[in-house]
């Protein structure tokens, strides 16, 4: 990792406030499918990076919290979308963390492997449309024309389209942060 771990005793007031919001919010109080905190108190994954720049980290973590806890996306669709981003960006941490969350959301090992390989299929039309749309956002730079938009809107609705666009952008940002600062899977979790 290119940034030092920040431990609770070493935090500024702004960093401490952000850490408290991450750990004390729904992420820290709900089921822990992957550790948010290392044994010595540092935050893991993108949260550790966010802590270094609380002016950006605070709104970024709020957006992530909204995507996870305040959208209409089903748990499965949300994790399908996140794992699509992880595969497209080759983000080891996001793949590792969200495979665990995906299992808890009901994704099976064969589905997780298919997502990692970029070949996911589902009999559920909403899941398939969401996956296909996320892949398009990640791979295709062409404009979403009226015909494609109308088909997508009729399948998943404008609200879900908005949620997926924001989710893909958010997790792409996290993947870039993790890549630039060389944050991988925590050593004790490998």
Image (cartoon, rainbow, N blue to C red):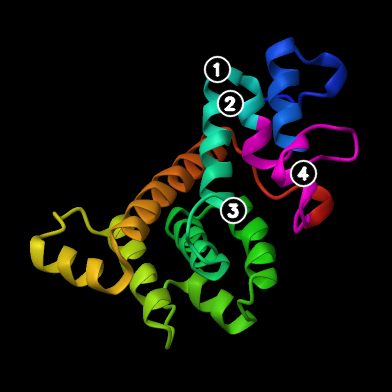
Relative depth, front residue between 115 and 130: 130
Horizontal arrangement in the rendering, residue 162 relative to residue 146 (left or right)? right
Cβ atoms under marks 1 and 2 closer than 8 Å: yes
Mark 1 sits on what residue?
Answer: 55
- Measured in 3D between alpha carbons, the distance from the residue under mark 2 to the one under mark 4, in whole angstroms, is 15 Å
Horizontal arrangement in the rendering, residue 11 relative to residue 14 (left or right)? right
Residue 47 lies in the magenta-colored region: yes
Magenta residues, dominant SS class: loop
Task: Kindly tell me whether residue 1 is visible in this rendering.
Answer: no
Q: Could you say whether the residue bearing mark 4 is in a helix, strand or loop?
A: helix
Cβ atoms under marks 2 and 3 closer than 8 Å: no
Q: Which residues are magenta?
A: 24-48
Mark 3 sits on what residue?
Answer: 94
Task: Kindly tell me whether residue 33 is visible in this rendering.
Answer: yes
Mark 4 nearby-residue class (10 Å; few <14, some 14–19, many ≥20): some
Mark 1 nearby-residue class (10 Å; few <14, some 14–19, many ≥20): few
Mark 4 sits on what residue?
Answer: 28
Identify the residue shown where x is 43% and y is 84%. Answer: 124
Mark closer to the chain start, 1 or 3: 1
Mark 2 nearby-residue class (10 Å; few <14, some 14–19, many ≥20): many
Mark 2 sits on what residue?
Answer: 58
- Measured in 3D between alpha carbons, the distance from the residue under mark 4 to the one under mark 1, in whole angstroms, is 21 Å
- Residue 6: where, in percent of width, then height? 77, 24
């Amino acid at each position: 990792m290119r940034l030092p771990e920040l431990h609770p005793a070493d935090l500024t007031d702004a960093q401490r406030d952000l850490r408290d919001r991450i750990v004390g919010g729904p992420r820290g109080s709900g089921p822990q499918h992957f550790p948010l905190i290392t044994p010595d108190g540092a935050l893991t994954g993108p949260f550790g990076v966010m802590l270094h720049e609380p002016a950006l980290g605070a709104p970024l973590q709020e957006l992530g919290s909204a995507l996870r806890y305040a959208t209409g996306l089903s748990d499965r669709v949300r994790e399908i979308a996140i794992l699509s981003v992880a595969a497209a960006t080759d983000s080891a941490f996001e793949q590792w963390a969200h495979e665990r969350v995906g299992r808890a959301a009901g994704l099976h090992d064969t589905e997780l492997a298919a997502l990692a390989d970029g070949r996911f299929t589902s009999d559920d039309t909403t899941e398939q449309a969401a996956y296909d749309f996320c892949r398009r956002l990640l791979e295709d730079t062409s404009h979403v024309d009226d015909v494609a938009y109308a088909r997508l809107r009729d399948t998943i609705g404008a609200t879900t389209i908005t949620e997926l666009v924001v989710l893909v952008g958010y997790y792409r940002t996290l993947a870039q942060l993790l890549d630039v600062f060389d944050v991988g899977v925590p050593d004790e979790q490998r």
